[in-house]
Amino acid sequence: MFESGAILLHLAERSGQFMPAGRRARNEVMEWLFWQVGNLGPMAGQLSHFVNYAEGEHPYSHRRYADEYNRCLGVLERRLEGREFIVGAYSIVDMACWPWVLISKPLGQGLDEFPNVARWREAVKARPAVQRGVDLGKEWRRSAPPSDEERRILFNQTARAVRGR
């Protein structure tokens, strides 16, 4: 199984956790999960590419994705008004969205103009299981930085490059 949204949905259904049982609430989770995989994740991911990996200057691309990321944070800001989590109780939607908000500062986007998002970011980060995951990520990055070959495989996966192997 691949794709983060599909994996989260599968795990929620299999475990009976982090997904409400009622039809209307379940539909709301699906809407916001699809919003994340079609908006927040791709826009933040593209911005991250131009901030972290693209060689040379790309002002149009950088500005475009910075603006789209900002727009997505605005959508999330409005959604979190009066809510602790995105769809009420902590769910797979929070799990899917949070990593892309966690990295807002390195992407050049502070959260001062998004107080609901900033509050939510900290509430999710304070969860013990999230803390354990963050700590594992830190440990992994310290112990095993990717080799040049791993970086090539991770970041040069064009159709031509993959077929040529």
Image (cartoon, rainbow, N blue to C red):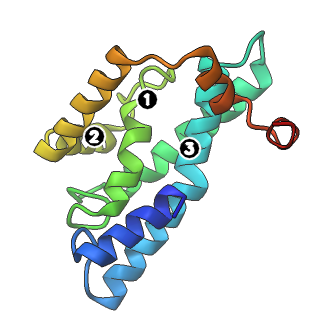
Q: Residue furthest top?
A: 56
- Identify the mark at residue 121; answer none if there is no mark: 2
Q: CA distance from mark 2 to mark 3?
A: 17 Å
Disc 2 is placed on an element classified as: helix
Q: Position of residue 116 (x, y in %)?
A: 29, 44
Are there few (<14), some (14-19), or many (20+) residues within 10 Å of tag 3?
some
Q: Position of residue 139 (x, y in %)?
A: 27, 22
Under mark 1, the amino acid is Ser
Dot 2 and dot 3 residues touching (CB under 8 Å):
no
Instruction: First in sequence, mark 2 or 3: give its number.
Output: 3
Q: Within the image, what quadrant is residue 152 found in?
A: top right
Tell me the quadrant of the picture where the C terminus can be found.
top right
Q: Position of residue 14 (x, y in %)?
A: 30, 76
* Residue behind mark 1: 104
Are there few (<14), some (14-19), or many (20+) residues within 10 Å of tag 1?
some
Which residue is rendered at x = 88% and y = 39% of the image?
Answer: 160
Which residue is rendered at x = 34% and y = 90% of the image?
Answer: 23
* Residue behind mark 3: 71
Under mark 2, the amino acid is Arg
Instruction: First in sequence, mark 1 or 3: give its number.
Output: 3
Dot 2 and dot 1 residues touching (CB under 8 Å):
yes
Q: Position of residue 43 (x, y in %)?
A: 61, 42
